Image: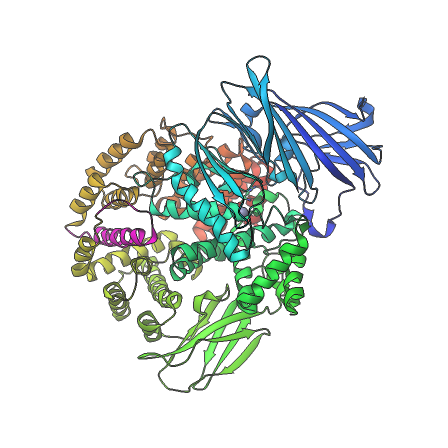
Amino acid sequence: MRTDTAPRPTLLSDYTPYNFSLDSVTLDFDLRVEATQVTTTLSVSRKAGGPMRLNGEGITLKSVSIDGQILARKDYQLTQTELVLDNVPDNCVIEIITQCNPSQNATLMGLYVSGGRFCTQCEAEGFRRITYYPDRPDVLSVFTVKITADKSKFPYLLANGNMTDNGEAPGGRHFAVWEDPFPKPCYLFALVAGDFDILEDSFTTMSGRDIPLTIYVDRGDAPRADYAMDALKRSMRWDETAFGREYDLDRFMIVAVRDFNFGAMENKGLNIFNSSLLLADGPSATDMNFERIESVVAHEYFHNWTGNRITCRDWFQLCLKEGFTVFRDQEFSADQRGAAVQRIKDVRALRARQFAEDAGPLAHPVRPSQYEKIDNFYTATIYEKGAELIRMLKTLLGADDFRKGCDYYFETLDGTAATVEQFIESFEAATDRDLSQFMLWYEQAGTPVLDVKRDSSSVTFTQSLRATPGQKTKRPMPMPIKWQVIGKDGPVSDPQMTVLNGASITVDLPNDRPDTTLSVLQDFSSPVRINSRNETGDYLRLMGGDPNSFNRWDAGQTLATKLLSTLTGAIESGRMPRVDTALRDYVSALRATLLSPDFDNNFKALTLSSPSVMTILQTRKASDPTAAALAVDWLHRAIGDRLRGDLLPLYNDLQDSGPFSPDAAAAGRRALKNASLALMGASFHPQAAPLALEQFNDATNMTDELSALVTLSQLGGRRVDQSLSRFYEKWEHNPLVIDKWFAVQAMRKLPGGIHDLSDLTEHSAYDRRNPNRVRALVGNFAMSNPHMFHNIDGTGYDFFTAQILDMDSRNPQVAARLAGAYEIWPKLDKARQALIQDQLRAIMAAGPSQNLSEIAGKILG
Ligand code: ARG
Ligand code: ZN
């Protein structure tokens, strides 16, 4: 049964402050798996007229009293989503008693049970599933939390802040009291109760305070939290040096849980993590896992200032904390692992996910002006494009003025719930600049196109932005453009910086030499698409000699994308792809990069990795995605063939010796080694299968083991099933690795087609209530198995829709997120467009949740 009401969008323009302030909040939890009772005591004072409206969903109201007087039923109104109290005195104490059932809470929002433990997720609107409350980010209060639970089953009782009391309670129970002195909105509330292994450490802050750090994990998993702990300490130090931000509470805790709707959550002093983003060791985690853990641990920690100390006035301002915090974690990772490689990875992700979003039916501004379900707005646009805007701000202002603006923001707005305008005004106030035009970046959806046109002595940059849903006309935005002139023997100018404020600008070239190439948008200085008149020869030159590593990599991507687009066209019209000059030249340039002593292994591996099917589809109209996937396969094979003599020696040279290290240098060596193995596999090198098998059997780290398994699974044959079974038996007891086992199969061309996939959903290890497992199988299938998902017989779509609807009956947030995979349909051929539209109509007709209906409805248009 649905408790949510008919879609009524929330509008930014409707914002009004809350009419009460909460001077303090006390929550008393009597934790029981099936019936938890929560006694909420609010000490309130009135700020404006009107009734007191409190949100509540999926909970049972037991009683309400004001100043000790129990209210009669006629004194309040109660609906499925609200408790409305009329006649609240100007200053009073309100006590509300509610009950909920954590064991049956499959939404994983509010208070739920995961692996026999209690935990919470409140952002964005989960607190209303715990008690009746003004569940909005601009109502801040200090919280005192008392937790009582069975002592043997739940030895640890945790909440935000500092523990001020604990002791025994009758009936084999015990209690703990936690106080958080920092006023916070309820979305930052957290509670955890259960049995854990703990990992302890400490950190001395810049002012000399000693902070105990504790990570709580499953029994037996403590050693797998070492890397997260190390990343946490590095993050704490980095925030002090890079932003002058010191930790504030007396202790810091992180808890890992296995059932979690997304990555992690920055609850004040008590971060809660999806275990997939916390637990790692060499044998069971890939280098990508380590990298993600480092960045997410940093991200959640950095939220303590950008999100918690200064929070958001309303959810339209989500980018204020998310965009800024992603920017901060990207800068941290760049310092830890190398700026160029980090920038390449961040831009690659931005283009794959955010550019696709911006070009499709779900396009929305970094600060949207309306939503139906805020959960649906935790998007690549708000996070990743939001981070790009902060980066541009830094580029426009320079590092020193950027830091001044940040300091001003932290000083003047600490303890408040702020807006994007206030953020931008901080930079204006601190640097005396006018940034009013910059606000357009927050308001206009879509990816601008930067057109570059040069003659012998000047270059003209022109920006344009196409209409997006709900936004017909667009205005020019301030665009920092880093560029440089490159000749045949290297750069012939210094790097230049032009800021394009209007529609168009013409600037003189520093040298008017013939035969030069422009390297434009170095370091990807603005989040735009380039329309350049550079030709193959120019890109080859940039690939060989652009001093800007990002653009050197990007030149290769541009060439590969062009090749893949042509190949896709050929395959679509039934022609055999051919090796031509462009391909030969491209592979020669790849080879030169691979053999150069000047570039590191991470960079080389990134240069070898080709653009995705998604990227190809973005460059084409009405395309067959299976043709694009064949084009990618064909290109890999052609590259492997042409590098045949180089790959094996490269692979052998890069063999690891000595103990495992997750650091960037070691990871780069593995990345390049496994990229060469994959290319040998793609081109059916006679050594590919034996090497992959040997690597699979002997691997001492998951990067090598999984890469070998993927190469084997692409080579096909009997050894695939044998390896998969072996892998399963070896890792049966590690759920994070079993997720990988499902993922590998979800991404391969299964011999029995869609039936094999259905069979996997019946496997004893498959758990349709666990989001990680569902994303591993169903999510990867839709995003990374174009051959099967886009099968023209429609069976891939049928399977996917059934899985979405099944998920929607329990967990609407995760269902809506999965459905986003259908946003690609306008880029596909007519037949598939029709098939997907039918699927979306079927979803809409099935009585979906409000989350799913918003996404499916918008995609359908
Ligand atoms: N604030 C969390 C972060 O660190 C994510 C919360 C996601 N919430 C949601 N409803 N999707 O990014
Ligand atoms: Zn965040």
Of all residues, the one furthest to the top in this rendering is 171
Seen from the viewer's position, the closer of residues 552 and 171 is 171
In the rendered image, the vertical position of residue 814 relative to residue 401, given as above or below: above
Is 89 contained in the magenta span?
no
Is 677 contained in the magenta span?
yes
Q: Residue at x 23, y 36 (%)?
A: 723
Q: Is residue 194 visible?
A: yes
Range of magenta residues: 658-686
Q: Residue at x 25, y 44 (%)?
A: 659
Residue 505 image position (x, y, % from top left): 55, 78
Q: Residue at x 74, y 37 (%)?
A: 23
In the rendered image, the vertical position of residue 799 relative to residue 14, given as above or below: above
In the picture, which quadrant includes the N terminus? Answer: top right
Task: Tell me which corner region of the image, top left, top right, bottom left or bottom right, holds residue 730.
Answer: top left
Residue 591 image position (x, y, % from top left): 24, 65
Q: Is residue 257 visible?
A: no
Task: Tell me which corner region of the image, top left, top right, bottom left or bottom right, holds residue 649.
Answer: bottom left
How many numbered marks are there? 0
Residue 462 image position (x, y, % from top left): 53, 74
Of all residues, the one furthest to the front in this rendering is 208
Residue 517 image position (x, y, % from top left): 38, 78
Q: How is the image coloured?
A: rainbow
Seen from the viewer's position, the closer of residues 416 and 498 is 416
Q: Quadrant of ligand 1?
A: top right
Of all residues, the one furthest to the left in this rendering is 686
Q: Main secondary structure of the magenta part?
A: helix
